[in-house]
Amino acid sequence: MSLPPGSRLPAAAQIAQFTFRPLAYFDECLARYGDPFMVDMGPVGTYVGVVAPELIKQVFTADPDALRAGEANEILEPMVGRNSVLLLDGPRHIRQRRLLLPPLHGERMQTYSRIMADATRASVARMPSGAPFAVHTHMQEITLRVILRAVFGLDEGETMGALEARLIEFLKPPPAAMTFVPVRYLDFPLSPYRTFVRRRDAVDRVLRELLRDRRARGTDGRTDILSLLMSARDEEGQPMTDDELRDELVTMLVAGHETSATALSWTVACLLENPEVAAKLDAELDGARGDGGGLDLGALPRLEYLDAVVKESLRLRPILPDVVRRVRAPTRVAGYDVPVGANLMPCIYLAHQREESWAEPRRFRPERFVGAKIDPYAWLPFGGGVRRCVGMAFALHEMKVVLAEMWLRARLRLETPGPVKTVRRTITMAPSGGTRVVLTERRRPTRRPEATA
Ligand code: HEM
């Protein structure tokens, strides 16, 4: 059998549906055509959506040469550059992953906890009382600060400040279309693409300056991501070039910042929409308050409800609705033949809404994760297989520290009663308005002076 069934709408209409109302379109495709289903976007490509854990497992465990994620991510090239781990396949991809993973795992995580908590405390102190504001703006501020420290080490100073300011500009969302329409169609004077290129060049200049500076000072004894990448040598003993380093750095900053900020904004929305869950979290966190009124970081490993809240929010509101693999060897899926050049698309959003996998899937019920073993092919907010997000452990840790620290210090309510709607923000599915809230009470003033974090 050839490709699975799918909509017969013209390609332009399918591109529009997929771009502007992806979740509803996914729901409709699954309901009408079953699992797997096809989305035919003409020049943008043919996509075969898969939802059931056994099909997702087949995609995630396939030979990475036959199903390539790097090729499928090529649309991100203008942003992250062609040497980015996101765009690589084969041995170069594995080599880069091996370099990036250690600083984002295990022991290193404890080093970041303090930075995460301090950045949160400083950000909460800047939240207005009684007037509505977007949680997302604060989350962006926190996660950018945290990822800059993790990537570049604990240096402060002018370069850090300049980089932070330019990155904020660079990461401002270009129109959603830019992530779908090949860039050559958008490159004309005064186009959003030209603005994007100007902002990208400004970031590049600071990064290259930073590389020169780090080379001059040396990387001995340093464990930040930049230093590890600079000390790495390939099989021929060659270091990474400046272009390669630049692309990997931008990848970490782009992949590790907006994603975590959006996920956190969703967690806050989910909690404020579900007061009974918020009350349970309150009860758990009350027992984990440190001397300064914020989180006792030592208590983190035993906070299992907090852990469940974060995982359940990533299930109910996954920020990326799907991941994609480009088919490079004919592949048979559920009796259909998917040809070379098409794309297989594990649908994260649909997998998380599947009634066979999750009881009452549309409800926010963190209890389902307490003491439960997670099926990695039913819960996949970080993708899977050899391409699973390298920042997963880091992001989960960060979400817990930031959420707990904020929750212990500020009482919030939604500006208007929920549910908070989903909107597309470039490639992420974000809460409308960045989760608009009102701070109703500072729970306990800090006795320590505010950190400058
Ligand atoms: C809640 C936050 C985050 C979410 C939901 C998320 C989600 C994802 C997803 C879905 C993928 C694609 C996986 C696949 O194709 O199977 C991915 C890849 C990646 N993520 Fe994340 N991510 C998050 C945070 C981070 C952070 C904090 C970092 C870095 C510090 C990071 C770095 C990366 C990188 C480098 C890749 C490419 C991996 C590869 O191609 O081998 N992400 N992420």
Image (spheres, grey):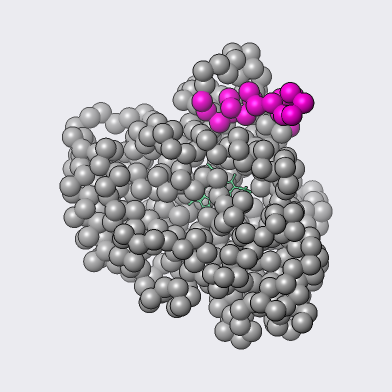
Please report the residue visible at 47 percent of the width from the left and 54 percent of the height from the top.
262
- Vertical position of residue 155 compared to residue 244: above or below: above
Q: Is residue 236 magenta?
A: yes
- Vertical position of residue 83 compared to residue 206: above or below: below
Residue 337 quadrant: bottom right
Measured as percent of width and height from the top left, residue 87 is found at 71, 47
Quick check: 437 left or right of 42? left
Measured as percent of width and height from the top left, residue 3 is found at 75, 78
Measured as percent of width and height from the top left, residue 250 is found at 63, 38
Give the residues drawn in magenta, as a range. 223-243
Measured as percent of width and height from the top left, residue 76 is found at 69, 50
Q: Is residue 275 visible?
A: yes
Q: Is residue 21 visible?
A: no
Please report the residue visible at 57 percent of the width from the left and 70 percent of the height from the top.
54
Quadrant of the image for the N terminus? bottom right
Q: Nearer the viewer, residue 58 or 427?
A: 58
Residue 25 quadrant: bottom right
- Vertical position of residue 199 compared to residue 157: above or below: below
Quadrant of the image for the C terminus? top left
Quick check: 176 left or right of 124? right
